[in-house]
Amino acid sequence: MTFSTEQKLRPELGRDERLLWAGVPGQGLRFRSSDWLMVPFSLMWGGFAFFWEFSVTAIGKAPLFMKLWGIPFVLMGLYIIVGRFFVDSLRRAHADYGVTDQRVIIVDGLFGRRVKSLALEGVADMSLSERPDGSGTITFGSGTGPSSWPGGSSWPGMRNRQPPSFEMIPGVRQVYSLIREAQQSNRGRRVA
C-alpha cells in the first residue's frame, strides 16, 4: 500500500472498517486486448474521414456544407486513433482502489471525486483477467452486452455502463484471493 493511496481512501472508511489493501491501476499509455479490434477500426474511420476532408477542400468548388460536414468525423478519427489512449491514461492516473474487511472501494474522477463502493457480500459475480506479468483486472459484475465491447477503453459515455473493476493492477491474483478471503470471513461472522 502506498501512503498517498491510503490517504485518499481514508475518508471513505467507516469507524470500525479496516483497510486490507490499497492500490492504483497501471499508469501511462497502455495497449488493451480490445485494441486489436479498435486500432484497425480507428485507422479505417480516420483514413476515410481524412480522405473525405482532403478531397472536398482540395477540389475548391465543393459547397461549404460539404467542407464542414467532415470536420466532426475527422475530430472523432483523431480521438479514436490517438486521443483515447491519453484520456484512458489520465483517467487511470486519477483512480485509487481499496479492499476493506467489509467492501471494495473505487475512487476516481477527472473533474471531481466519484466513489463506488460494493459490499463484499453483494459481490456475487467477480472475474479475474491475468496477464503473464501478474498484472490484470478484477471485474465486479457481468461484463456482457454492447457496453462491454470497447473493453474498458475511454469511449465517451461508456465508462458508466461498464461494471466496476480494479483495472491493470499488479499482483492481481493476490488481490483477488484477498477479496475472496474477506468474503469468507464476512460469511463466517454472519453465521456465528
Image: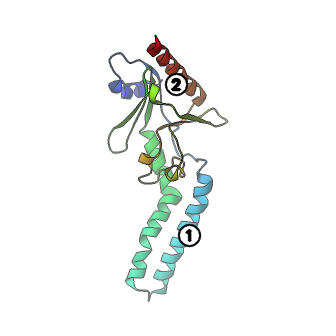
Q: Is residue 135 left or right of residue 78?
A: right
Q: Residue sitting at 59 percent across and 50 percent down?
A: 34
How many other residues sit within 10 Å of disc 1, few (<14), some (14-19) or many (≥20)?
some
Q: Position of residue 123 (x, y in %)?
A: 48, 30
- Residue drawn where x is 43% and y is 33% of the image: 96
Q: Secondary structure at mark 2?
A: helix
Residue count near mark 2 (Cα–Cα under 10 Å), binned few <14, some 14–19, many ≥20: many
Vertical position of residue 158 compared to residue 44: above or below: above
Q: Which residue is mark 2?
A: 179
Farthest-out residue, bottom: 61
3D distance between C-alphas at marks 2 and 1: 45 Å
Compare residues 19 and 8 and report the one nearer the observer.
Answer: 19
Three-letter code, disc 1: Gly
| Badge number at residue 47 | 1
Rendered view: 120 above or below 86: above
Looking at this view, name the residue that lies furthest to the top.
Answer: 192
Instruction: Give the x, y percent position of residue 136.
Output: 58, 36
Expressed as whole percent of the image width and height from the top left, the position of residue 168 reads 55, 37
x, y (%) of residue 179? 52, 24
Q: Earlier in the sequence, mark 2 or mark 1?
A: 1
| SS of the residue under disc 1 | helix
Q: Would you identify the image quadrant in which residue 189 lies?
A: top left
Q: Quadrant of residue 115?
A: top left
Which is more foreground, mark 2 or mark 1? 2
